[in-house]
């Protein structure tokens, strides 16, 4: 694999852009300034640019050939940054409760934006090295599982060329500059459920005159633990977490309802279906056992699809990475129980895809996970590695020696 021409020449502006994005994060579905900056730079690089569903898409056609789409997510998190970096975010926002919260790129989406813009610039500047169409897609609202669908709802599939293959990457806690790949399921499906169970309010000193939803909710929480422990086969994977249980306002008042927030992670669609069915079955049964006066309600939200890498595409990308970076910098990626909505985009096109990880942890420094207020990837070599990875994967399909894409 030939070198990525121009990577050294772009380093200064890429690092400057990263610092700017890091210091000016925007929450999901509010990425106005971020989108404007992305669009400005894509136009500067010679791309045809469209704003679609809150995101930005740049298309560069360089003769006949296949089409590669690469996606980067662009939203930030309601997390107050505690990195002490000179370019740390000072941005705040008001949440749904009216409280002021810090906003930061605690998941590394500023890395993703910078790497894709860097790759877009390098591909535009070295058109002799490839032929076909390159699509740089910048997606909003990944953190709320709404952004990919928003772009699809705004006509994405009819407004850009159909890609033959799609890629995405995520900065992770591996050593900076190391790439991780794996075929098959790589990120879990994720489902959040707001469950409301109903009781009958009463005086705390007269529990016999009511139906206590606090006790009902406690019984539900305990019984939900049996889904993984007793209903899921030992060789299968599932996580069921009750992250919140809220009821009542005062010690001597039995309330009329309780609200549970439940999160589910799975790697298999059949396991997912069984787990969700079991949750509803258990909740309904416990409500009946408690004499609940109303049936429970289930509000599903923040639902993320499974990220399931195409084996042949992943093998092709991994081989290209090994040829370019060397075996020592390309490692097997463990399955990750975080979730993503990227796969909705290639699924809508019927396109195979590969999603890989880019290490961002500096050796000898404390390692903090994504979403931590201390999360701060090392700029070097993380930004170079992520930028080069996109170019290398793209040229594996658009370069002169590229093989035909498997439709697996």
Image (tube, rainbow, N blue to C red):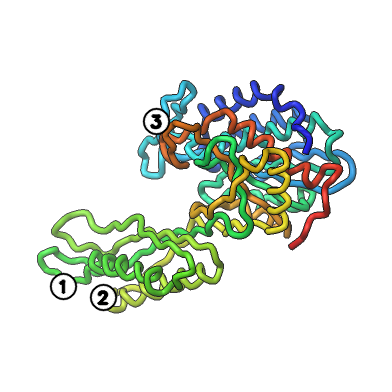
Earlier in the chain: of badge 1 and badge 2, it is 1
- On the rendered structure, is 56 left or right of 142? right
Q: Between residues 169 and 210, which one lies in front from this camera angle?
A: 169
Q: Which part of the image, by quadrant, shows the N terminus?
A: top right
- Residue 150 shows in this picture: no
Residue lying at 58% horizontally and 33% vertically, measured from the top left = 382
Comparing labels 3 and 2, the label whose residue is closer to the camera: 3
Picture disc at residue 290? 2
When asked about the image quadrant of residue 8, the answer is top right
Dot 3: within a 10 Å radius of its alpha carbon, few (fewer than 14), some, or many (20 or more) residues?
Answer: some
Q: Between residues 208 and 378, which one lies in front from this camera angle?
A: 378
Secondary structure found at label 3: loop
Q: CA distance from mark 3 to mark 2?
A: 46 Å
Picture disc at residue 209? 1
Residue lying at 64% horizontally and 31% vertically, measured from the top left = 384
Comparing labels 1 and 2, the label whose residue is closer to the camera: 2
Earlier in the chain: of badge 3 and badge 2, it is 3
Please give the residue where the numbered disc 3 appears in the rendered image: 82
Determine whether 159 is above or below 46 in the image: below
Task: Please provide percent x and percent y for residue 110.
Answer: 56, 34
When asked about the image quadrant of residue 211, the answer is bottom left
């Amino acid at each position: 694999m030939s070198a990525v021409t121009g990577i050294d020449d772009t380093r200064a502006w890429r690092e400057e852009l990263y610092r700017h994005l890091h210091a000016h994060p925007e929450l999901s579905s509010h990425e106005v300034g971020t989108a404007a900056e992305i669009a400005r730079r894509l136009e500067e690089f010679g791309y045809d640019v469209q704003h679609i569903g809150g995101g930005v898409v740049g298309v560069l056609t360089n003769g006949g050939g296949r089409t590669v789409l690469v996606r980067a997510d662009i939203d930030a998190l309601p997390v107050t940054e505690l990195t002490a970096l000179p370019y740390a975010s000072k941005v705040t926002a008001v949440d749904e409760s009216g409280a002021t919260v810090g906003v930061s790129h605690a998941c590394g989406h500023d890395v993703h934006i910078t790497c894709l813009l860097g790759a877009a610039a390098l591909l535009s500047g070295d058109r002799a090295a490839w032929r076909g169409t390159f699509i740089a897609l910048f997606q909003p609202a990944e953190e709320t599982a709404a952004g990919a669908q928003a772009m699809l709802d705004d006509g994405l599939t009819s407004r850009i060329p159909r890609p033959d293959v799609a890629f995405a990457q995520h900065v992770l806690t591996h050593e900076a500059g190391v790439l991780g790949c794996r075929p098959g399921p790589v990120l879990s499906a994720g489902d959040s459920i707001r469950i409301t169970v109903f009781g009958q309010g009463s005086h705390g000193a007269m529990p016999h005159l009511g139906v206590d939803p606090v006790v009902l909710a406690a019984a539900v929480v305990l019984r939900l633990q049996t889904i993984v422990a007793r209903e899921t086969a030992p060789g299968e994977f599932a996580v069921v977490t009750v992250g919140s249980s809220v009821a009542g306002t005062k010690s001597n008042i039995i309330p009329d309802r309780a609200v549970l927030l439940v999160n589910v992670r799975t790697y298999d669609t059949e396991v997912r279906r069984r787990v969700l069915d079991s949750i509803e079955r258990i909740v309904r049964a416990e409500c009946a056992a408690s004499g609940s006066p109303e049936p429970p309600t289930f509000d599903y939200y923040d639902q993320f699809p499974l990220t399931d890498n195409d084996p042949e595409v992943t093998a092709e990308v991994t081989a290209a990475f090994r040829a370019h970076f060397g075996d020592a910098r390309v490692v097997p990626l463990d399955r990750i129980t975080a979730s993503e909505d990227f796969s909705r985009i290639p699924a809508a096109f019927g396109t195979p895809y590969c999603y890989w990880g880019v290490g961002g942890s500096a050796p000898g420094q404390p390692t903090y996970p994504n979403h931590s207020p201390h999360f701060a990837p090392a700029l070097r070599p993380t930004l170079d590695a992520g930028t080069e990875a996109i170019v290398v994967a793209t040229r594996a399909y658009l370069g002169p020696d590229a093989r035909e894409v498997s439709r697996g």
